[in-house]
Image (spheres, rainbow, N blue to C red):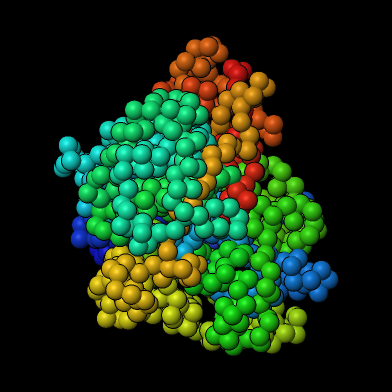
Amino acid sequence: EAADADRWVRGTCRFCGVGCRVELGLKGDRPVAIRGVPESKTNLGYVCMKGMLFYKLMLHPDRLKKPLYRARKSESFREISWEEALDIAAKKFAQAVREHGPNSVAYYGSGQALTEETYLFQKIFRAGLRTNNVEGNPRLCMASAVGGYITSFGADEPIGSYADIEKAFCFFIIGSNMAEAHPVLFRRIMRRKLDHPEDVKVINADPRISPTSRIADIHLQFRPGTDLALLNAMAYVIIEEGLYDEDFIRQYATFRVGKKKKEVDFDTYRRFLADYTPERASQICGGNITPDKIRQVARWFATSRGTMSLWTMGINQRIRGVWANNLIHNLHILTGQLCKPGADSFSLTGQPNACGGVREAGGLCHILPAHRPVVKDHLRHEVERLWGVPKGRIPKKPGYHTIAMFTALNEGKIKAIWINCTSPAQSLPNCDKYRKGLAREDVFIIVSDIFPTKTTEFANLILPTAFHFEKTGVFGCTERRSQLTVKVLDPPGEAKPEVWIAREWALKLAQELGDPVIKKCVEPFLGLDEGYDLPKAIWDEYTQKLTAGRDNDLRGATYEVLKKRPDGVQWPAPTEELALRGGTYKKFVRGIDPLAEEHAKDNKPYQFYGPAHPDRKLWIWLRPYKGAAEEPDSEYPFFLSTGRVIDHWHTASMTGRIIELMRANPYAYVEINPKDAKRLGIRPGDMVLVESRRGHNILPAKIYEGPMEGMVFVYWYDQHEDRLINKVTKDAFDPGSKEPEFKICACRIRRV
Ligand code: MGD
Ligand code: SF4
């Protein structure tokens, strides 16, 4: 079909956090193909199967094309006009605010929404409706990484870039199956290893042998949740063998402990680590972890000419996710494996715009745009001033985080919620529990999506939206890189871009509540065409006003510049001149990062100006090992873990509609270690009951030397109610980041 294309237009992939640059092939107005671009900086021309095929969603017959409404959830939907839909949406939200106060309404968004969309929604909710109930699915995915970066480095998001991969000599891949979840980036690591098989070492630390483990020199397999002990033991070896960088530590680091962030000295840290000798850690970790292996990987980590750690949900989706992030950062600070070429503590992002749209543009309940904590008075008032709304308009108190938000729905405290670009009825842990709130007749639910999903089944109002390439906006991927995709196609039927929907709704809301400040929120955007001018004006307001002087300064990355730079721009990029050169490849390094120069307090080469650490130091944390929220016992003797498969994206509401991907991976199964299978008399393909204290599934068995003995693994994309693994997972969450522990709970299995 690609041969049919008569023109190619540029943009980014719609799916994962790698942020591959792609070109969409069009034949007339019909999308016919997607291809990579060899000169691209992110993906060097490669795209994975799902990236290559998402154009098929644009003309898919299931696309939502008209607003749909039902007054009661027991009724069937009827088609209505946009005028009527927006009237109902405004009336219902206004009614909730009038009768139950501002905190009875909420927005639940997505790391897949464009930055312009998240920015506008959160502005209307915070300054217009006076609530910080602005959340999104990045809470399920990146919140622990945010917590880790802020507490360790004083600033969110990685210091380095993908370009470090080609300069690194040791890769420490922990809690990440990047071969499937970030396939194109993994390819770069594989290339690096193949080009330098002896010089480059790959360590993979994971309770499961995954496709990522194939390239590892050492695979560390441990009982789920025990990696906190492993990471502390690596630090122990680094200190015991004198492999730490004394000079780097003296210049740039302090040691901290506890909730009060008390500063302690190096000897206290050393004494703390005495509990984590490799011998003791190998006992805690189990699996194949021996003291010798711990020593070996610690040496590789510390002594390589550039060590890069990469991790995702195996570290983040944990009740000690922030601590686990801290312990990885500790190793980099101890060894000075930071800021130099090929050295970085690099968290991989799950979604295409979790960084740009949500972490940066204010899409979580505790942060305002440009990394401003909502509780900080001067920053909140600064945002009010920049928006031209009265001082005190934005409440000080953070809103509900994700689990608290859906608990509030269960309890009837939230009366109206807008769910955009995500499907919590399938993606929340222990989802049956939260479906009760979604099903309540006294909770009014708007879902804006491109397809019917498990969540639209609970909606009162379904709003059809434009898809990628059918609207204009920016995605900011893992490496602080913002890339623009411009509208080239009209959305099907009456589907509309979210920025138009939000603006028109806000105008009606202002009328309903008789509140001119709500109108003020969208005033700069009135009358602008939604195809390009409207998102551009929103981007301009966000970048020129809100990011000015902040660590993610994006003032140079105007739409004009982004159009000239197909690979996008990495922040900080305060000037157009720097943005035209691509922005900042490494933060905090003088001579590379303009803000390091601007904020320089002395003549040291690195300047850690991150806003959360006034002492401008990196913090090495004393974090003890603590196990999972629910460990196996005699009743539920197995660990259950869940994750992604290469062919599908999350709930598969999109990839499940692409026939080639469904053929490749039609349904979820449960991976069982051969030793466990033999013991339980389970053969390949047998149907197996996977049951926890919360719910059960029945899945076909795959007998596979992947999960370690005593652990089973299930992909979570399957939409079939019997195979929907989030009926089984647990909704315990990290007390700091509030990110749920999708990766670990206890279950039992048996052949049925
Ligand atoms: P998606 O399938 O990505 O899953 O979970 P979800 O966000 O619920 O949902 C995105 C929705 O956006 C789809 O329904 C799609 O049709 C819609 N969409 C696509 N384009 C557009 C658009 O332009 N506009 C609008 N309005 N809608 C659009 C993800 C969540 O799941 C995350 S982020 C993580 S990290 C968690 N991972 C995880 C896990 O590892 N294990 C288990 N068991 N559960 C998990 N749940 C979490
Ligand atoms: Fe898209 Fe991610 Fe695949 Fe790249 S690796 S093509 S961004 S899904």
- Return the residue nearer the eye: 311 or 417: 311
Left or right: residue 607 versus residue 98 is: left
Left or right: residue 622 versus residue 86 is: left
Residue furthest right in the image: 99
The quarter of the picture where the C terminus appears is top right
In this rendering, the answer to whether 353 lies above or below 257 is below
In this rendering, the answer to whether 177 lies above or below 134 is above
Left or right: residue 521 versus residue 275 is: right
- Return the residue nearer the eye: 568 or 2: 568
* Horizontal and vertical percent position of residue 66: 59, 64
Look at the image and tell me whether residue 684 can be seen. Answer: yes
Taking the spot 43% from the left edge, 51% from the top edge, the residue there is: 266
* Horizontal and vertical percent position of residue 342: 25, 53
* Horizontal and vertical percent position of residue 703: 45, 21
- Return the residue nearer the eye: 446 or 604: 604
In this rendering, the answer to whether 731 lies above or below 5 is above
Look at the image and tell me whether residue 357 can be seen. Answer: no
Q: Where, by quadrant of the figure, is residue 241 drawn?
A: top left
Taking the spot 72% from the left edge, 85% from the top edge, the residue there is: 515
* Horizontal and vertical percent position of residue 183: 34, 45
Q: Where, by quadrant of the figure, is residue 549 drawn?
A: bottom left
Left or right: residue 625 versus residue 408 is: left
Taking the spot 69% from the left edge, 42% from the top edge, the residue there is: 432
Taking the spot 27% from the left edge, 33% from the top edge, the residue there is: 217
